[in-house]
Amino acid sequence: MSQSTTTAGSHAIRPMSKEERKVIVASSLGTVFEWYDFYLYGSLAAVIAVKFFSQFDETTRNIFALLAFAAGFLVRPFGALVFGRLGDLVGRKYTFLVTILIMGASTFVVGILPTSDQIGILAPIALIMLRMLQGLALGGEYGGAATYVAEHAPNNRRGFYTSFIQITATAGLFLSLIVILGTRVALGEKDFADWGWRVPFLLSAVLLVISVWIRMQMQESPAFQKMKEEGTHSKAPLSEAFGQWKNAKIALFALLGMVMGQAVVWYTGQFYALFFLGSVLKVDVFTTNLLIAYSLVLGSGGFVLFGWLSDKIGRKPIILGGCLLAALTYFPLFKLMSAEANPALTKAHETITVRVLADPATCSFQFNPVGTAKFTEPCDIVKANLARLSVNYKVDPAPAGTVASVKIGDEAPIAGNIANFPAVLGAAITKAGYPAASNPSVVKMSGAFDIFREQPAVLIGILTILVIYVTMVYGPIAAALVEMFPTRIRYTSMSLPYHIGNGWFGGLMPATAFAMIAQTGDVYYGLWYPIVIALATVVIGLFFVPETKDRDIFEDGRA
């Protein structure tokens, strides 16, 4: 039988070898870094704003902190191009050894970086440069790790082998939760805010040393080595991958028919759920992190389960099925989450009528992904404050020139241009029946064993379902992307759609969802963002993305 007719189904399943386990561990640690660093910076943004942008007022420093955060997202696709090209030219092993060195060193240096009180303007400049280095390195890390593992895996087990890379993304998030919570408890809030925030960044050195030591011992992937020996590797990966329509269209369909939906389901199930619990339902930070941590522990086995299952029934049914299930059930799940986490707020949504009276021409769509835009019209001020208070409201158009106001029930309207408007609005909303900050019905956990109470247990169940959706779409995605592209341009081709999908479609979710909530006055309306994108992915993936599980990636045309 010629090698070209070999399919995954004709290979006998054998146990994973010691060398293959080392390959998976070495490749996966980089993904742990990716999400460990992402969550560290996101959760500590307020502290970082004070430490590195202290020369500005509070509003401006928060804007710059968000800009530094966004910088890591924005450059990821460029890192995919730079390191993807390098990986297809010189090899997988050396390229993603470079990426983890850059990424790990950048994360560690944040922990020892002098603050703006010590070195002035050089501190924020250095921080933003480090964030950009991290983003560039991350752009090359995932594609290299996924490609390296897949090219070491047997044809009929690529989904299972690469699923271990996927589970470490959640492992990085979980690790960051544990480290932050542990450091806060051990040091206390005062010392943590003073210097203890550096500890989680400094601990990344442990991951870096272990990962580099393991990767130094690895061999080049057999598919790339074979191609290199035969002289068939690409001399111009970028132009071949994206300058030729036959390859570029595959990358486009991979983005729109797989990664785009995977990204929004991923961010909704973990990061938006975190935002929704804390910012919308007003659950305290400790309880929110503990609920998410338990759901990650309970649901993360799905990464390996669905990776393994994709070797049996295919990548498409699981990825598109996860997108479809998520789109169909997000509204009931998030509404149930609200009813359990903050019953008083849910009751207020159902019983208290709030209306905004405003000239439509003065109302903006408050899309502000990097925190730099300022919305100063009374209509925008009114709607933004209501959204931050988690109030459901309707907008009634008023004649041109009318100053925006809020009408709560039968009370007199409150004009949006009065002095101290946020405080006046907050007091009026509370008087009308919305829960105050001391709301006793909101879920609160003081320790790990509180999960046995009904309220936390139900919430953990809901969050675990959301994590299972994440595992469905994310578990098989690495194998699917690897199999879609030929070896000669695989690293370059798969990295770009992955990072555009996750860095931009997924990364824009919080800002887009908040803008949609503020625009409509419905705290659930932001869910339409992941639902529409997930459904679009189902349709595009169904008709334009081929099933790839039986492809032999060592064949010419693929290799």
Image (cartoon, rainbow, N blue to C red):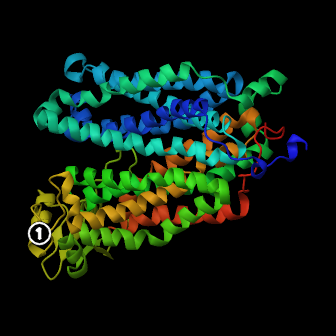
Q: Is residue 224 left or right of residue 76?
A: right
Q: Position of residue 336 (x, y in %)?
A: 32, 72
Q: Quadrant of residue 72?
A: top left
Image location (x, y in percent) of residue 504: 50, 47
Disc 1 is placed on an element classified as helix
Q: Label 1 amino acid?
A: Thr
466 or 425: nearer the viewer: 466
Q: Is residue 407 visible?
A: yes
Q: Find residue 37 and report its image quarter.
A: top left
Residue 374 lies left or right of residue 300; in this view the side is: left
Q: Decide which of 83, 28 is in the foreground and name it.
A: 28
- Dividing the picture into quadrants, the one containing residue 454 is bottom left
What residue do we see at 68% from left, 53% from top? 253
Answer above or below: position of 210 versus 552. above
Query: Where 445 sits versus 189, above or below?
Result: below
Residue at 21% across, 33% down: 50
Q: Nearer the viewer, residue 229 or 39?
A: 229
Label 1 environment density (alpha carbons within 10 Å; few <14, some 14–19, many ≥20) = some
Q: Is residue 271 above or below residue 221?
A: below
Note whether residue 363 is visible: no
Q: Quadrant of the N terminus?
A: top right
How far across and how far down the image is residue 448, in percent? 21, 52
Is residue 376 found left or right of 364 in the rendered image? left
Residue at image coords 55%, 48%: 501
Q: Which residue is mark 1?
A: 430
